[in-house]
Amino acid sequence: SSQASLGSRADLFQSELSRVTASPNWQAEFGPRLVRTVHDGKVHIDTRLTRTMGMATVMVAGMTPTTCSERLVAAINGAGYHAEFAGGGVHSEKDMAEKLTALAASIPPGQGITLNCIYINPRQWTFQFPALLRLRREGVPVDGLCIGGGVPSFGAALEIIGQLRDAGIRHVAFKPSSAKAIRNVVRVARAAEGFPVILQWTGGRAGGHHSCEDFHQPILETYAAVRACANVALVAGSGFGDAAGTLPYMTGEWSTRFGRAPMPFDGILLGSRIMVAKEAATSLAAKELIVAAAGLPDSEWDTTYDGARGGVITVVSEYGELIHALETRATSFLKDIYRTVLSQPREKQPAILQARRSEIIARLNSDYMRPWFGKKADGRVVDLEDMTYAEVVGRMVALMYVKHQQRWIHTSYRQAVVDFIARAERRLCVSAPDAPLVAELGDANPLSYARRLVDEYPGAAKLVLSSEDVQFFVGLCKRRGQKPLPFIPVLDSDFGVLLQKDTIWQSEDVDSVVDSDPQRTGVQQGPVAAPHSTTVDEPVKDILDSIYHSHIESLIERLHGGDKSSIPVVEYVGADPVAESLPSTVLVEASASKCSYQMPASAGELPERGVWLQALAGPRKSWLRALLTAPAIVQGDRLVSNYVLRMLRPRPSQVVTVHFADGLPSLVEIVGPTGLLELELLLAASSTVRLTVNHQTLYGKVVPFPLEFDYCPTYILAPIQGSKSAEDDSVRDFCNNVWAASAEQPTEYVDFDDPNHLLVDELTISRDHARGFCACVGNESWQYAFADNGSLQAPIEFMTITAIRSLLADLQSSVFGAGQVNVVHMYHRTKVADGVHMLSVGDTVSTITSITGLVNLGPGKRISTAIKAYCRGKLIGT
């Protein structure tokens, strides 16, 4: 904004008012507007966030484990809102691909996925970020990345944005923790060359990883700098849960109580409030704890640093960052342990733990989700080295297998038990068994594992673990790549990791906790957000609608005096058109009904493609502008590059005419230099875009290539949707008409799906054939131009030329499938049979063509064919 910076003392002495820097009117420039969309008649709030993301102004933050659920994120998207998928609960690239692919299949076509990735977790970041880029390149509809847990350095952030842009990802979000970090985000955004940046400000009162900052003061300090950056959308989060509390942040009135001008945000971010939603995987017991928590007013949120207040307590997470959680026996124990043990240098922790050994083990067993592992069959608490092999197996199963539900808590836990049984078997067996015990377990009831070990090796019931196997078991508990095991085996320098790593998921699976006790779990919850959750299992759509629709009703009163008819009508909610001027080399003739563009004859004088497409899209939002500004086309649950943009690129001597109806584009026609109508693009119905490309074959036949798309302005980041199967059929029909065309009569193509199908062709070589082929390939050999002894020779390539129709038929067949327009000829090899004379004009060549291979490779499919050529009844080559 030109008014985002303040003036100086010199303005006081200006003699001309027009030269004085005006004070900013952020409310007028950035405040919410209302618009009504033509296609559905609905009223929407229009802000920079909606124009960036194409979704409503209320969104849901990435929260581990809550939004690690495809079901919840899909339900939020299906309700018309945006939710970030939390990457904190994704532990492998395979897991991530499966989850995002499943989510893509669950959300409405045209909506996108945003991954929330924790930057301070280097292990997750190093596989999640590259996997995200790869998935987007493979067509998964990934629209954005939210970087949580710290703002990358300036150079790293720009590198990340560059990679996102190259992959086709549309926006990035940052969650700064202080005024300094906000300025760093703004600096990055300014250098990002217009790439959309979403700045999510939550302050210290948010439930998840956050800062210790007051919510208001840092944004008061930096608001002008944020608004000076045109590609930054500003979102407010933390402590929100209803319409009344969030509306002042949308209108900007929150800042007036601090003596400042109104400072509107572009959107609202919800987190803790969603944990009680019906679709959230939060256990019923944990939801009831949330509803029971009184919470705190904004003025008291930081009192939880000293201890539990309003049912909420502040603890240090596994990443060493502060988080708010409900006050439970588990979080109270964790706060005490951090204060007395984990806050001390790591090398001193084992001695402190041993000094408080009995107390800590008792608290683990009575209050925490991960109890002490050491326990004899009679219930006595012991150390690991005092347990027998059978007792260890039984204890592992008891803590990792949910008996009443007959399931492992996690699939990796069974493998941990099996690995220990294999170790025990090697220790206990006297001679090699015919078959190892672990091979016989198969589908056996896990509750029988210990008994079966004793039946096979009676010593397992009496022999305690050797020192080597104690170390093996501890190493098994710390093994990378598996979900952390749900117990504490030893009190050593890794106690903090064993105690805290990956624990918050258990609030969603109380059955996995000893006694199914929710007080043993940690339930993240912001102290200011807690009072807003008063009902268990409220549908997430109702939660979000109650806020968003209430905002709309309030804004109708504030902005339009309650008169809905005065709300402006728009084609869709999206970025305003960009005005582009074409170079003078393009001749333009405009009238009320049409506008024609004559392209220059020289390629060097053509306009740049981006400039041309913006000009062609016109000055108003329309189906044509949506098509020409969409970088991708939706095909089912995948995105493909918008190939229409390539079709419409400017070419020399073209005449492009746009016809209008009621001031909006209705038809686009492109006529080539020869006068052929090369392309026709029109809105056939209110939501159907029809594109026809006309191709003229070598024999003068004009073959149309028709495509149809659905125009869905609801999802403006991907408003053009096509059918992959319909497009494949259209491509095959087009290729058949072009490839099978002849001077006499087009050949009717007959499909086949048998890879052993043989195709036969025959060609009598004429003088025109031979000379025409030589002219095409630049073969100037005299023997093909002049007859020798009355006979004109023909190139040996006619063995392949004769079979060309069969080769093309193979490519069009159901054996090959789709992909004709992407075919690339890799190589061919010709072997002439021994004793064969050269071909001559007048010879008749017959060929038999077969498919010899079809292989799926990384870059695509590879088809191999073989041709046998005959002449005068003899095999002449292959």
Image: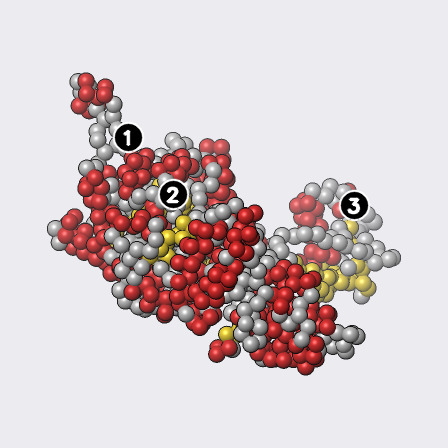
Helix or strand or loop: what does disc 1 sit on? loop
Rate crowding at label 2 as few (under 14), some (14 to 19) or many (20 or more) other CA atoms within 10 Å. many
Q: Earlier in the sequence, mark 2 or mark 1?
A: 1
Q: Local crowd at mark 1 within 10 Å, few (<14), some, or many (≥20)?
A: some
Q: How many marks?
A: 3
Residue 537 image offset from top left, x and y in percent: 32, 68
Q: Residue at x 74, y 77 (%)?
A: 435
Binning the other alpha carbons within 10 Å of mark 3 as few (below 14), some (14 to 19) or many (20 upward) gives few
Which residue bears the numbered disc 2?
Answer: 177
Q: Is residue 486 above or below residue 153?
A: below
Horizontal side, residue 528 vs residue 710: left or right: left
Calculate the distance from the C-alpha at mark 3 to the C-alpha at mark 1. Answer: 81 Å
| Element class at badge 3 | helix
178 up-or-down from 303: above or below: above
Residue drawn at x 22%, y 41% is 255
Question: Which residue is located at x 62 percent, y 77 percent?
Answer: 450
Task: Name the spot of residue 366 as percent of width and height, x first.
Answer: 45, 67
**Kind of residue at badge 1:** Ser
Residue 405 can be seen, yes or no: yes
Quadrant in the rendering for residue 837: bottom right
In the picture of the structure, the residue carrying the numbered disc 3 is 783
Circle 2 or circle 3, nearest the eye: 2
